[in-house]
Amino acid sequence: MDKYFRDAPREIAKLSAPRPVGIVSRPRVVALLSQALDSGACWLAAPGGYGKTTAVIDFLEHGGLEQGGLKQGESAYNWYRVDTEDQDVARLFHYLTLSLDGRHAGMPVFGPEYADNSDDFARLFFRTYFSRLDPGTILVLDDLHRADAPGFRRTLAILLRERPNTVRCICTSRMLPEGDVADLVLSGQLPVLNQTLLEFSPGEARNLVTARSQSPSEVGDISEARGWAVGLLLLANAGMYYPLSQTGLAGGAGLREIVGRYFLRDIAPEDQDLLIRLNVLPEISTELADAFLGSPQAARLLVRLQHRQLLITRDGPGGAAFQLHDCCANTLPAYWTGA
């Protein structure tokens, strides 16, 4: 993949694409992405753990001549990983300028004089920025949910409107487009690939588990993961860390059993009680969890479970909302009560 990067300063992490290690190509998703990019830009929206970033890398790596990805003779793609600091649009302009590397001389600089007129500056900046990109460049804006704020959404909408036909743009987020960006969806200028389209099909799920598992024949019912990439990887890797033959789960352990026995069993008893009580809520925010239980421990438990990727997260204007995946939610009562 590095052969496509000509000038981007790779020492800056937010301007570097993740390494494509162990990716199992999904031609169906590559074709969907290629079709969506016929309009010049598209938006991938799904909760965490559904493979949005991986799908983009798959497209850039394997789209190629067959599916309309990077073709021989085309230019580089520029990768930009959004974070919370980008809510200050001055930082967005700064790092996009850095991404031009040797072609950044003379780029407009966002100074105090533009503080009350950032939209006009954004139009000037993006017109200049896009003029510095080689024809055929793909701009990837990853993790857009991390900087979701009205000012950032407005600036993003300007970027998408100022994009010339010679440049394509892929956006990924845990949220559907909102505000000014949603207007582009309504006008047909920004196709959306949602969770339903990004979920692993049964065949894709089997290919992923087979590729990642040391003992594919011992992997159980993959349908319980319901296309959730994280759940499929739990199935694939369970035998690596917990030999199935030593636990009574050999020869077809289901995802619920694996989650219950291996990923929930070491949760402290007091946390188990908190989690069972929170499980009645369809979606959980840290504030709601603390208020519901009257304990600050609830929010800390959610953060720990998120780090272990047992939660689906949906970031929105009101903050992060957590939800246990169905396989985890259905496991809890039976596992901890011994039913």
Image: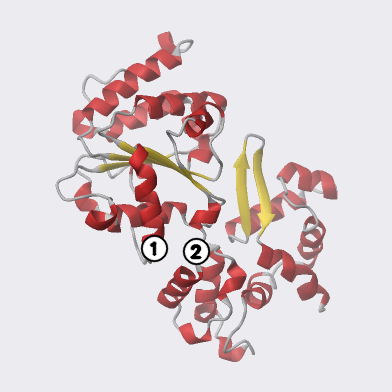
Q: How many numbered marks appear?
A: 2
**Residue 26 — which label?**
1
Judge from the rendering whether residue 202 lies leftward or rightward of residue 225; answer left or right.
Answer: left
> Is residue 241 positioned above or below 37 on the image?
below
Residue 37 in the image: x percent, y percent? Answer: 35, 43
Packing grade of label 2 (10 A; few <14, some 14-19, many >=20) is many
Visible residue check, residue 48: no
Judge from the rendering whether residue 251 lies leftward or rightward of residue 104; answer left or right.
Answer: right
> Is residue 141 positioned above or below 201 on the image?
above
Q: Mark 1 is on which residue type?
A: Arg
Residue 26 in the image: x percent, y percent? Answer: 39, 63
Packing grade of label 1 (10 A; few <14, some 14-19, many >=20) is many
State which quadrant residue 188 falls in. top left
Q: Secondary structure at mark 2?
A: loop
Q: Quadrant of the C terminus?
A: bottom right
State which quadrant residue 317 falls in. top right
Depth check: give the residue in front, 322 or 61. 61
Q: Secondary structure at mark 1?
A: loop
**Residue 200 — which label?**
2
Residue 140 in the image: x percent, y percent? Answer: 36, 42
* Mark positioned earlier in the residue sequence (1 or 2): 1
The answer to whether the residue labelled 1 contacts the one labelled 2, judged by CB atoms less than 8 Å apart, is yes
> Is residue 27 positioned above or below 258 on the image?
above
